[in-house]
Amino acid sequence: MSPVKVLVKAYYERLYERMARGRARLVARIDRLLPAEIDRQGFGPMGPEGLEAYRQACHAFVDERIETYNPIGIQYTFDRRTSSQAAELEFELNWYDSRAEFEELVTMAKVLAPGDVPDEALGDLTAELISQVGAFPDRSIIAGYAEQPALQKLPDFIVACAIEQVICERQPDIG
């Protein structure tokens, strides 16, 4: 396996570890960000049931993202060709376009791992990759929402902001 592939796989695994360990902090941040964003965008008035529905959607999206990064998750049980087809389908189905962000992730991985990566350096390189690019596809989600805020995009946006702040320790640019 090429050093870039090793680094990208380690990146996803590190995100999984951080998110699984930090889920409670993510949920707490979501619970603060969500009502503030609803007020900021003027999506109200929203009753307690509506707010709770969006809150539950955000929590479900956190679980989905954790599973997406899971190194032994379902996405790793398919062969490369099937995996590529699944990625293309995901790019088509999402309301945001994350292709450029993925290319930036791979490019940064190439910069950080131009040759063989010793095992002892992988942890530091992975942390640096997360520091440089955040958690894929957060920047695409945040940019798509900032361009055209909408209630149906709200859970993805809130989760992306929470992940960037809590897991990646970055302040997202929300437009």
Image: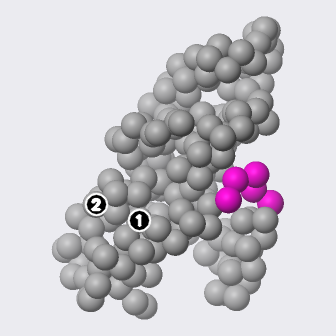
Q: The magenta stretch spans which residues? A: 93-97
Task: Give the x, y percent position of residue 122.
Answer: 27, 72
Residue 171 visible in the picture: yes
Q: Is residue 85 above or below residue 175?
A: below
For the residue marked with disc 2, what is the amino acid?
Glu
Task: Give the x, y percent position of residue 85.
Answer: 75, 80
Task: Give the x, y percent position of residue 48.
Answer: 76, 10
Q: Which of the 4 image quadrants contains residue 149?
A: top right
Task: Give the x, y percent position of residue 52.
Answer: 73, 19
Q: Nearer the viewer, mark 1 or mark 2?
A: 2
Residue 7 shown in magenta: no
Residue placed under numbered mark 2 in the picture: 128
What residue do we see at 28% from left, 74% from top? Answer: 112
Q: Is residue 103 above or below residue 150?
A: below
| Lower sequence index among marks 1 and 2 | 1
Q: Which of the 4 image quadrants contains residue 120?
A: bottom left
Q: Is residue 94 above or below residue 164?
A: below
Residue 95 shown in magenta: yes
Packing grade of label 1 (10 A; few <14, some 14-19, many >=20) is many
Residue placed under numbered mark 1 in the picture: 11
For the residue marked with disc 1, what is the amino acid?
Tyr
